[in-house]
Amino acid sequence: MDGSMKVFKYRWVMLGVFMLVVAINQLMWISFAPITGEAAGFYGVSDLAIGLLSMVFMIVFIVVSIPASWVIDTYGIRVGVGIGVVLTGLFGLLRGVFAADYTWVLVSQIGIAIGQPFILNAITKIAGRWFPMRERATAAGLGSLAIYAGIFTGLAVTPMLVQRSSIPTALMIYGAVSMAITAVFAVLARERPPEPVGPEERSLVFDGLKSVFRNRQFILLLVLFFIGLGLFNAVTTWIEDIVRPRGFSIEQAGLIGGLMVIGGIVGAVVIPPFSDRLQRRIPFILLALGGAIPGLIGITFATSYPLLLISAFILGAFLLASGPLGFQYGAEITYPAPEGTSNGLLLLAGQVSGIAFIIGMDMLKSPSTGSMTLPLIILTGAMGAALLLATRLTESALVRNQ
């Protein structure tokens, strides 16, 4: 269907710039997760107060996601994503300047968090506007890969920076990088290619909202994102608390979380292109959800450091690969609803559940040892339920007609 459509090499530049923006925003989100205990001591607050620095991204997302999707779909990429880029750069720098003050750090986190949906909700918009149908799951996969790359950097590099310097130094470095990426986006970002590269006509945003909530397949996909993305948000937020009772250090916790994200990068690179090549989404979504369960079991019970690393990699490789597949599948089954609308709603579901899972894990952990085994067992059961629900998905008409 799109074989005769013209494609433009600049699509890769556009995707590369967008990936930089996504990565730095996600690094800002997760940078406190692997140093929870040390940050709590530095600021003189509780572990939950440090968890709030990550959780605020999910809280803000619930409020801002739909307006952000409306801006992206109404005013386009440069305006919509540009708002997120500017907020990330300015508040990232502010966070570095006032890094010694918890209140200012929290305010800065809120500013960066407001920018997040303006960035993340555009993943399928970039893919749909710049890439032909045969490459869109791949483009969405690379966009999601940037999420994982930013998270990995935050999880793995932050503990090393803090151990070798200080929390304020680490935050100042991240702030300077965020401003540099803001400048790169301003110079290189383009709105659209010279000619359309595939079907792009979309309904109005609020008409799209009405249509997606009448779509049973999309409602089912929302439930899957509620479980899967919420689980990922909760596990990454509490990664140090999960492994600390087993005697592991903050650097080891950072590497465990980082390896989970490396697995996600591998999965996002390998699995979506196969989906594009075979023009099938459902088998790969099932593979991703099913493969994540053994990894989660390992995270729940492993006391050996090598086994924890292996489990983290398996969990990430499968669970995180389901994200870009789900984003593209959601855009296809809700067509002609705007991509920003479907993308934003899926992310919104994961933010709502992330808040619930983060609070729930803190409430259900052992009061004597701090162990989070019980809440992790409950989340494993939820993943099993998600796998069963995913068997009821059907391929989209857009893919069947290729």
Image (tube, grey):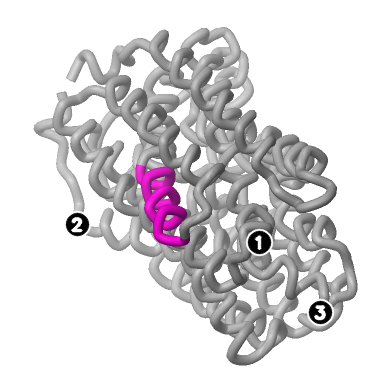
Residue type, label 3 = Phe
Find the distance from the CA under tag 2 to the CA under tag 1: 47 Å
- Left or right: where does residue 269 sit relative to residue 377? left
Residue type, label 1 = Arg
Residue type, label 2 = Lys
Residue 29 position, x and y percent, is: 63, 60
Residue 252 position, x and y percent, is: 53, 69
* Residue highlighted by disc 1: 244
Please identify the quarter of the rendering in which residue 61 is found: top right
Q: Nearer the viewer, residue 380 or 129?
A: 380
User: Tag 1, which secondary structure?
Assistant: helix
Residue 230 position, x and y percent, is: 61, 37
Q: Main structural element of the magenta stretch: helix, strand or loop?
A: helix
> Which badge, 3 or 1, comes first in the chain's sequence?
3
- Left or right: where does residue 90 sit relative to residue 236? right
Magenta span: 305-317
Q: Is residue 323 above or below residue 111?
A: above
Q: Nearer the viewer, residue 199 or 59?
A: 59
Disc 2 + disc 1, Cβ < 8 Å: no
Q: Is residue 155 above or below residue 135?
A: below
Residue at x-position 33% and y-position 50% = 142
> Which badge, 3 or 2, comes first in the chain's sequence?
2
Quadrant that contains the C terminus: top left
Residue 146 in view in this figure = no
Residue 287 position, x and y percent, is: 31, 28
Disc 3 + disc 1, Cβ < 8 Å: no
Q: Is residue 62 above or below residue 107?
A: above
* Residue highlighted by disc 2: 9
Residue at x-position 82% and y-position 75% = 41
* Residue highlighted by disc 3: 42
Residue at x-position 34% and y-position 58% = 14
Q: Magenta stretch: residue 213 in it?
A: no
